[in-house]
């Protein structure tokens, strides 16, 4: 079955760049997502990328997709303390009724 | 624009009592609807999903059930709660391919079974 894996923790200094990595197993994935979850809240969609794209940039966020290696990354430039949260990677293939989520990476930003 | 609401936000229930969490979606038609559970602030476990009224798929055997009495209403229930049912429950919806089949989440409901 489908599987999505992420490292559990990442710690960076304020102002540095953060890179959160994700690997997935389903080569049929057509959509890949990044969500952010702040304490006690639901998941907020940050961005998503179609599988026919290599990169997507949205302000401080850059998503890189390597389909060959089934590797997805989220880069946050100029990381701020407000970026501290859990970040979830998720994948989905066309017409599927559900997505597969990773276990989340807890990003801690130190001042 | 589309919005999703779920309630209650926080719930403390004794073991053996019933449960009802409700979720409604506004601004879209015929959404896919989902219930997830998140234990200890970690990964998401898909409990149920629905592609239409009365159509419920269960992902894991458990003490819970789901119903979809209306197109944009999804209800998570239990007749008798267990301690292990404690967790953070998230309702979600997704639309069509034009929206990237993206799943959008509600704000979650904290359930503590005591």
Image (tube, coloured by chain):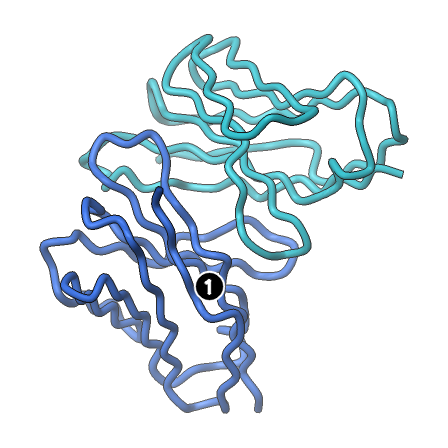
Chain colours: A blue, B cyan
How many badges with numbers are in the image? 1
Q: Is residue B85 above or below residue B76?
A: below
SS for callout 1: strand
Left or right of B96 on screen, residue A98: right
Residue sitting at 50 percent across and 37 percent down?
B46
Quadrant, the C terminus of chain B? top right
Q: Quadrant of residue B13?
A: top right
What chain does mark 1 sit on? Answer: A
Quadrant, the N terminus of chain B? top left
* Residue with the mark numbered 1: A87
Q: Quadrant of residue A59?
A: bottom left
Q: Position of residue A57 (x, y in %)?
A: 21, 69
Residue sitting at 47 percent across and 35 percent down?
B92
Residue sitting at 57 percent across and 44 percent down?
B107
Residue sitting at 75 percent across and 23 percent down?
B19
Q: Is residue B86 above or below residue A37?
A: above
């Amino acid at each position: 079955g489908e599987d999505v894996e992420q490292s559990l923790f990442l710690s960076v200094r304020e102002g540095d760049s953060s890179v959160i990595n994700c690997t997935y197993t389903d080569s049929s994935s057509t959509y890949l997502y990044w969500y952010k979850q702040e304490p006690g809240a639901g998941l907020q969609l940050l961005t998503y990328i179609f599988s026919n794209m290599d990169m997507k940039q949205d302000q401080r966020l850059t998503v890189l997709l390597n389909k060959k290696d089934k590797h997805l990354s989220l880069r946050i430039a100029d990381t701020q303390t407000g970026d501290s949260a859990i970040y979830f990677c998720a994948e989905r293939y066309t017409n599927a009724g559900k997505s597969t989520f990773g276990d989340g990476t807890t990003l801690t930003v130190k001042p | 624009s589309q919005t999703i609401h779920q309630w209650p936000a926080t719930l403390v229930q004794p073991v053996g009592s019933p449960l009802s969490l409700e979720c409604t979606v506004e601004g879209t038609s015929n959404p896919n609807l989902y219930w997830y559970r998140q234990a200890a602030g970690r990964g998401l476990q898909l409990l149920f999903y629905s592609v239409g009224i009365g159509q419920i798929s269960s992902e894991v055997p458990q003490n819970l059930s789901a119903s979809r009495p209306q197109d944009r209403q999804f209800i998570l229930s239990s007749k008798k709660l267990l301690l292990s049912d404690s967790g953070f429950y998230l309702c979600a919806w997704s639309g069509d391919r034009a929206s990237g089949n993206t799943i959008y989440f509600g704000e979650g409901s904290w359930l503590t079974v005591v």
